[in-house]
Amino acid sequence: MTTIGFLHTGDVHVSTFRRLREELAPGWQDLHIVDESLLADARRAGITAGLAARVDARLHELADRGADIIVCTCSSLGEHAEGRTADLGVPVLRADRPMAEAAVAAGRRIAVVATVDSTLAPTGNLLRDAAARAGQDVELVEVRCPEAFALFEAGELGAYAELIARKAREAAPGVDVIVLAQPSAAPAAALLNDLPIPVLASPRTAVGRAIAEAGPVR
């Protein structure tokens, strides 16, 4: 039986990605590791050598426990994590890559909505890489809403989504597509259905990509 492993930096992501795995690959299994300290340290000092080693240890733990493919759901850590495939012997995906590819296909001017600044550089690098691979030029518009993260940490997820949606709506008139940089922001997309431009979140496309790369659902 195929197993998708997930590395998270928040407990809230376990149920989100488990539901998607159950929906999209009901005969498979999912395995989750949550380490909130990884994001806390990335926010404080970026991806240091020490933090990279700890991320690697968590990825190895998932591989050792039987994951056939691993998804790193933290956008601050994904750039480092997806480069670890060769060392692990197990494919490692960053959850936001399929979203980035869809954003580049949707338009040139892309709003990147982020609740932690440590996400902005890796997400920007990812979008520029996706654009380069597609032979396109993009212009990124950073939409910071750090005040929202305190709501997330307090478990006020409804207010968190509403604040993100408000910031995204303010940016919408000047862009072609909106990217919700963190998986935790995905519920905000449902509050923006009336916008005339795409609003993209990463969880569903991440699980879909993991399934596609791991093999057919049986």
Image (cartoon, rainbow, N blue to C red):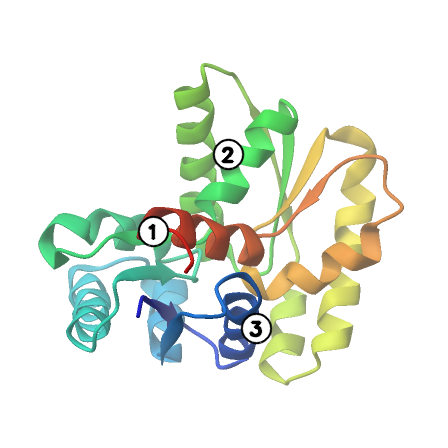
Q: For the residue marked with disc 1, what is the amino acid?
A: Gly
Label 3: which secondary element: helix
Q: Which mark is residue 196?
A: none
Using the image as rendered, state which of residue 18 and residue 114 is in the foreground. 18
State which quarter of the image contains the C terminus. bottom left
Q: Residue at x 82, y 51 (%)?
A: 192
Q: Residue at x 42, y 73 (%)?
A: 9
Q: Is residue 146 above or below residue 141?
A: below
Q: Residue furthest bottom?
A: 154
Could you tell me residue 191's position as x and y percent? 82, 58
Using the image as rendered, state which of residue 166 and residue 79 is in the foreground. 79
- Figure quadrant of residue 165: bottom right
Q: For the residue marked with disc 3, what is the amino acid?
A: Arg
Q: Is residue 103 above or below residue 66?
A: above
N-terminal of the pair, mark 3 or mark 1, is 3
State which quarter of the image contains the N terminus. bottom left
Circle 2 packing at 10 Å, graded few (<14), some (14-19), many (20+), is: some
Look at mark 1 in the image and give the residue it sits on: 215
Whether residue 71 sits left or right of residue 141 in the image: it is left
Q: Residue at x 54, y 50 (%)?
A: 205
What's the distance in space between the residues labelled 2 and 3, CA to CA?
A: 23 Å
Q: Are marks 3 and 1 in contact (CB under 8 Å)?
A: no
Q: Which mark is residue 101?
A: 2
Q: Which mark is residue 19?
A: 3
